[in-house]
Amino acid sequence: MNRASSVLTIVLALAFAPFPTSDLRAQASPSVQERVDQIFERWDSEETPGCAVGVKEGGATVLESAYGMADLEHGVPNTPETIFEAGSVSKQFTAAAVVLLAEDGVLSLDDDVRAHIPELPDYGPTITIRHLLTHTSGLRDWGSVAAITGWGREARVHDHDHVLDILVRQSALNFPPGDRYSYSNSGYNLLAMIVERAGGSRFADFSQERIFETLSLNNTEWRNDYTRIVPGRASAYAPRSGGGFSIARPNENVHGNGGLLTTVEDLLAWSAAIRSGDLGGPTFSETMHSQAVLNDGRTITYAAGLQVDQHRGVPEVAHTGSTRGYRAFLGHYPEQDLHVALLCNISSQNPGQAGRAVVDLFLGDVAVTAEAPSGIELAPEVLRETEGLYRNEFTGEPMRLAVQEGRLVMDGGNHLIPRSATEFQVGTTDQVFRFVPSQNGGPTRIRTLVGTFEGDEYLALAEFDPSAEELSNYAGRYHSEDAEMTVEVEARGKELFFHRRPADEIRLEPLYADAFRMAGTGLLVRFIRNDEGEVTEVSLRQARVYDLRFGRLD
């Protein structure tokens, strides 16, 4: 028997209606409800966690369903009223608090962040509040720095004092403010602190008074104390490798970047309110949806805690969320007056995929499926000339190209579609790779274009197979004040190992000269040499920390 609970509201404009139209409620049509049930059927069980989903269309809530269990230990099922954690969907609420203060004249989005958080280092170029809102500040993600040290967000209880303590130690930015986009939770934790310092009250209290109570979001609050009992809250889970599930709830008091406790009903009300101007008025709504413009003039999709983009050719305002075992999606489709909210308590659910699968049911034929162009046909020997290893000249990240079944494929799986012998389109995206052979017989370069803007360059490299003697040159102890840690690199024959307190030993896999991948972590490890060719530093890089330096001690 299907455990999904559902409600469909049908609004009928009948002049002779003997009762208010808001009381007209009926079951969802089988065609829609059954297809929604199919999307979540793997979680429609008393043995699994699951999800809750809600849909608002034309101003009316037309669907609310729930699947699986909120608490496996006590046999409590999920319902549309179950409280989940919203992950990074929370960011738009933090952004709203900041924008409300800007509307009040208490602060400006163009304020120097150090005017409110003077503890932060002076990096030269000004970091503004707007940079924090749009992930263009260049600030390293504090959680990523903590993870590099071995004490990540799941390893100890962090609060905002820990966040600030990590950030004030960082001696460098990932990039100059406004040059690039790099998703960073640091910005949104700083925004929560700015609301407290500028607004004169706790961030949670300001949110409660100005946002949650104003919009009657009666089941929404911040998880600023992870030990607090919250009636009706779902626990969160992750699959075990041998079967079953383990508890995966956040053990941190950091919030603003995430940490919003809410329901699908409250998320639907919120999504409608920030578009209509019911909160803050029309200028508030406009600011929330204003996309960032980088220093080179390129407009990106990120606005104030919102991604303003398209889904299958339809304008979309959306965001996903992920914290430990919780997953979330909130999407708005203004041309259809459609809002879809999804909250889950299982880490293996892809929220964007499931949420947009529900969206597609309601968009119907309006949405289009993007198809990759066929491109031109190139001789196999021409394609083979492009194969090999390349290095991103800004990030240092490697990229491999290979010919598979007559097509050029990136190591991430994207096909490169030939427009000519030297120019390829990356799948269905607007990114183009242009191969530029060296004039003097040197390595080939790839120049990337995104629309009309130049992107990063890649340089062709030889694969690295170091000898035992070469590996011994990297051995030693290295220290970073930014991370407050010392590490040891050990060479054992033709293998290199990275030692981190208290007992981590991680193998380093060679990529290209002086560059390795830290096995199982995805971290890029590069050894830096001085003018005499001596190894003097180690640089660690991952998605949200670009160049964390460790100086050699011995």
Image (cartoon, helix red, strand yellow):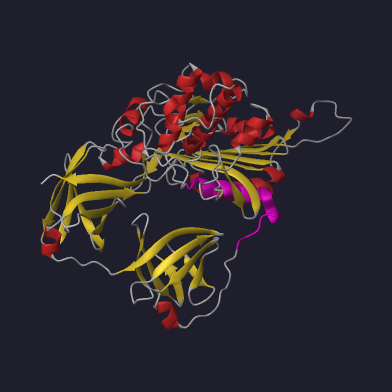
Residue 542, placed above or below residue 376: above
| Res 375 visible | yes
What residue appears at the point 63 percent right and 30 percent down from the top-left corner? 284
The quarter of the displayed image where residue 29 is located = top right
> Image check: 232 left or right of 11?
left
Residue 63 spot, x, y in % from top left = 65, 39
Residue 439 or residue 95, whichever sits in front? 439
* Stretch in magenta: 349-370
Looking at this view, name the residue that lies furthest to the right.
16
The quarter of the displayed image where residue 443 is located = bottom left
What residue appears at the point 42 percent right and 83 percent down from the top-left corner? 381
Residue 366 spot, x, y in % from top left = 70, 54
What residue appears at the point 48 percent right and 66 percent down from the top-left corner? 433
Q: Is residue 321 magenta?
A: no
Residue 334, placed above or below residue 23: below
Residue 423 spot, x, y in % from top left = 50, 71
| Magenta stretch, overall SS | helix
Residue 162, placed above or below residue 339: above
Residue 41 spot, x, y in % from top left = 53, 48
Q: Is residue 355 magenta?
A: yes
Instruction: Locate the N terminus and report the quarter of the image it occupies.
Output: top right
> Image check: 113 left or right of 167?
right
What residue appears at the point 53 percent right and 80 percent down from the top-left corner? 377
> Image check: 36 left or right of 460?
right
| Res 82 visible | no
Residue 132 or residue 75, whichever sits in front? 132
